[in-house]
Image (cartoon, coloured by chain):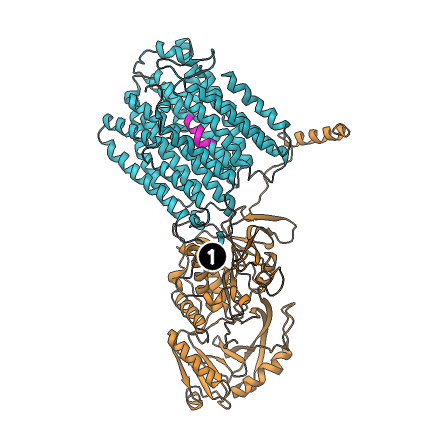
Amino acid sequence: MPFSDWNGKMSEIKKKIQSFLPGGAWTQLHDTSYLPPEHSDVVIVGGGVMGLSVAYWLKRLEKPRGAIRVLVVERDHTYSQASTVLSVGGIRQQFSVPENIQLSLFSFDFLRNINEYLAVVDDPPLDIQFNPSGYLLLASEKGAAVLESNVRVQRQEGAKVCLMSPEQLRNKFPWINPEGVALASYGMEHEGWFDPWSLLQGLRRKAQSMGVLFCQGEVTRFVSSSSHVETPSGEEVTLKRVHEVHVKIDHSLEYQPVECAIVINAAGAWSGQIAELAGVGKGPPGTLQGTKLPVEPRKRYVYLWNCPQGPGLETPFVIDASGAYFRREGLGNNYLGGCSPTEEEEPDPENLEVDHEFFQDKVWPPLAQRVPAFESLKVRSAWAGYYDYNTFDQNGVVGPHPLVVNMYFATGFSGHGLQQAPAVGRAVAEMVLHGNFQTINLRPFLFNRFHLGEKVQEHNII
Amino acid sequence: MLKIILPTMMLIPLAWLSKYNMIWINTTAYSMLISLISLTYFNQSPDNNLSFSLLFFADSLSAPLLTLTTWLLPLMLMASQHHLSKETLIRKKLYITMLITLQLLLIMTFTSTELIMFYILFEATLMPTLIIITRWGNQTERLNAGLYFLFYTLVGSLPLLIALLWTQNNLGTLHLLVIQFWVQPLPNTWSNTLLWLACMMAFMVKMPLYGLHLWLPKAHVEAPIAGSMVLAAVLLKLGGYGMMRITMLLNPLTNHMAYPFMMLSLWGMIMTSSICLRQTDLKSLIAYSSVSHMALVIMAVLIQSPWSYTGATALMIAHGLTSSLLFCLANSNYERIHSRTMILARGLQMLLPLMAAWWLLASLTNLALPPTINLVGELFVVMASFSWSNITIILLGINITITALYSLFMLITTQRGKLTHHIKNVNPSFTRENSLMALHLLPLLLLSLNPKIILGPIY
């Protein structure tokens, strides 16, 4: 009954009136500048190089300027666990899938002309410290035929790769021990390594100048509406549409619902969790409804060592037949390297702690065998980073989800995302703005392939 | 007149006392019945008007506007059902009460006889509109929008109060039916110039005139759908109606005082039409197109010839229905896609063909396709201004071209083209939405069969 707590209600009303009379200490308008806006046309989950690239290209390809409002939501602004900044930073065209080669070629062109693409008025030009030293892939007897066919595909796409025999190897790179190497492919142009942090900062600066909004927070919920439709084959599916993204602020329970039209999942190693939040994969297994996004974080170690007698300045990024790799870092006889563990030895991706035993057991022996100078080296430091590993076929997922119709993916690149980020960003922007891929046809990379079982297997995964 | 005002007032208890599942049905149905009553006012005698009392009367000018206002209330209620569905019952009833209060004040404004009463109600309509914009708008910018809306209109209309009080003291009365016989030519002094400015500025801001139009895109874009509809359809016409009434006091000063405002209107209509071509936000485009159409009305009222008054009246009614229809269409898009950006939702004709038909008809009426009343209004205004000064035909012709350009641009961007992937599962059109569009278009198209009822007092 409304009259039972009359006194209580009256005192509440009196308190309220007193509080907003002048002289009271109550203010209605709090500062909410740390919150994301209440409405954004596109919300990009993940502020690594992939998310920033999509944001940049969306702003660059929109027809009338200032048409789309883009919000990039990044959980950790120090990027302490992001794959982008922990990456070794190489770019190569030596892939087996033609689309990968095209993506890397365009990305190389982007990086070469980065100051034309990412110039901001009154800001200094970017220096990504690009070392165009090329990649050297070594193959044993078993892999020689595959290597040769790969090189043929790469040459067709326009990459400049040459095949070398062991003698040619020894002539060109005297520090190498070509024992066990049957064939080598050496990328002569458009390959090398660069500083991923500068690329990230350059993209961020340019995106900010184009009007992209950044916000620090974690996406905890997608509010969506769904409708049941029947496919031509009679199967009933649920089409979903995300219309609100809840962004939770760090160290607080506060969240902001952002009303949006399109969500882009560029969350890297955590894309699988984001996809699950949106309802991807909730259904009976084997159907399109129940196909999850097969991206999970995999930990990879990178070690930095110093070897005074090591290979010189011309050293390319060497990938041994055993899977171990290294590259020169800087001018002080330092080298970066590592090795992908086999399926059985996969480290636990719970944290980013480094296993130094791994270096002693798995990385050093093959490298020392390949480069005799590496028998005496001193490990300076090591770190670990995540691959956004696509367990299906180790290639990226690009494009919209067939059922959650306004979620686009740009993730799952399993270790070669950084080098393809500019091209993938452009492809996703074209998909959003024009409805199809216009420059590089990434139809094989759509989500559908997980359900249809069409693997785009990439053989040259480090 | 009380036969409309009392039922409208009683709609408020109807809204508060209805059950939760009957509030929309009750209020929509009864407000539609009230609008049928207002149709009886079209039975005007040619030389005078329908005089109901000392306070209210219905002229050939105010009858069409009154009918437009009463017709719009059921349409506003129909349009608001979806976005209010998630609010609590009391909030819904509050919203409906705001709309009905606004309706009441507007009815009284259009039919008032005394200019002071007109002024009071003119200002009073600001309050419910402000509440609707700032409380139920969608985005944080709505606070700014409400501020702009309120203060532009207030500052413009306070001098009007002073001018009206002075005129009342001077003439002895401000009864519209009396002053039309009592008015004498104003001598050309500085104080009369200021009087002219004071009288006209309120309506110039409301129309809005090009230099004072900044509040309109903000208010229209941030308002919820019913707010946008009533702003575009009726509140802007308050300015036109007021100007047409007050200019009878201000002769012959208008002959030379009108020049700057004519220039601003002529230039402004081309400018705002051109801005429409560059707009990315759908509601913003429709808002600027409102400014452009109203600039034509300002021009017509300032020319003060019989044909221009006819054109102004016809244009006001036609624009009211068209603009409101366009806002409803934009809202139906927004409710599905949650974004007002045009390029994010393309190729809708494939998904929602009936809605595409309404879009087509709305764009065609917006660009003044014959034989709609939009064309009748525009044509009369163009002819009157040509006879006032030959050169204006160039500017008006450019404006008509650009209007056609942006209307078709809006149509083609949203309806034609390749369907974007992320709108493939939008809900199909509701019957409520289709009937909303049909109820807007039906009067518009039927009036092209008998436009003389909206051609105003001079016809």
Please state the horizontal and vertical placement of residue A402, each as a whole percent of the image: 52, 59
Q: Main secondary structure of the magenta part?
A: helix
The answer to whether residue A67 is visible is no
Which of these two is toward me, A249 or A426? Answer: A426
The chain holding disc 1 is A
The residue under the point 47% across, 57% down is A55
Colour orange belongs to chain? A
Q: Is residue A118 left or right of residue A44?
A: left
In the image, farthest residue toward the left: B390
Residue tagged 1: A55
Which amino acid type corresponds to the residue marked 1 in the rendered image? Answer: Ala
Q: Residue A201: give x, y in percent of width and height.
A: 48, 61
Identify the magenta region: B230-237
Is residue A388 within the magenta segment? no
Q: Which chain is cyan?
A: B
Most extreme residue toward the right, as rendered?
A4
- In the rendered image, which quarter contains the N terminus of chain A? top right
Measuring from the top left, give residue A124's x and y in whole percent.
41, 60
User: Where A273 sits versus B57, above or below?
Assistant: below
Near-viewer residue (B107 or A201): B107
